[in-house]
Image: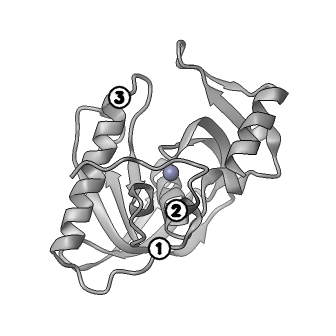
Amino acid sequence: MLQEVVTLPYPGLRKRSKPIGHISDSTRQLVKDMEESTLDWENRREHEVGVALAAVQIDSHKRVVVIRNDFDNKKDKTFTAFINPEITKYEGEPTSEYEGCLSVKDLYGRVPRYPKVQVNAKNIDGKVVNITAEGFLARIFQHEIDHTNGILFVDRIKDEPEAFHRLRKISGNIEKLSEEERDAAFKEIF
Ligand SMILES: [Zn+2]
């Protein structure tokens, strides 16, 4: 069933999610709802792609994440689900790139993330999977696993106001926030 993607300042987004013990029909239904809700969100936006979602974003506090299989291709509508995902190793020096979030309206930030991570999770069949993720995929895992711990990308750059940007609706460009815009945004999200 299609669910509303919740956005800040909704307090549930900053709550830690609980691990899944046994993968049941309700887990499988949750994954379907997450995929459907991500695609619906994307269909209503011209310049944005829904690359991934954590369950907390549809207000379910379970440690479940879905990631688009081909996030460079909007036509590919398939996802992979990760149950109880955990980062077991960080590698390299963090670098800052633009990041957005379905739960943070219009804001983008330059967020430092590790270029390479090792992830341990279960797939939807309950099988343990170990993934080495690099580049953008490593960034996605760090962003989504943060969600399962109640952390949003804006929380990571809270002390760096210069890192905040906004997507301009008409042009689709990402630009720096003016001081007034930043004040208004901070009031809403923190
Ligand atoms: Zn997000």
Q: Secondary structure at mark 3?
A: loop
Which residue is found at the position 47% from the left and 73% from the top?
Answer: 17
Instruction: State which tag comes first along the sequence, 3 or 1.
Output: 1
Residue kind at label 2, given as amino acid type? His
Q: Quadrant of residue 167?
A: top right
Q: Is residue 28 above or below residue 3?
A: below
Q: Disc number at residue 147?
A: 2
Which residue is found at the position 40% from the left and 53% from the top?
Answer: 53
Residue 104 vs residue 77, the one in the foreground = 104
Residue 95 visible: no
Q: Secondary structure at mark 2?
A: helix
Residue kind at label 3, given as amino acid type? Arg
Within 10 Å of disc 1 (Cα), the crowding (few <14, some 14-19, many 20+) is: many
Q: Disc number at residue 4?
A: none
Which residue is found at the position 30% from the left and 46% from the top?
Answer: 37
Residue 138 vs residue 4, the one in the foreground = 4
Q: Quadrant of residue 120?
A: bottom left
Q: Within 8 Å: ligand 1 and the Cβ of disc 2? A: yes
Q: Is residue 67 above or below residue 131?
A: above
The location of residue 61, given as percent across then percent down, is 42, 70
Q: Disc number at residue 17?
A: 1
Q: Within 8 Å: ligand 1 and the Cβ of disc 3? A: no
The location of residue 56, given as percent across then percent down, is 44, 62
Return the residue at label 3: 44
Q: Is residue 63 above or below residue 163?
A: below
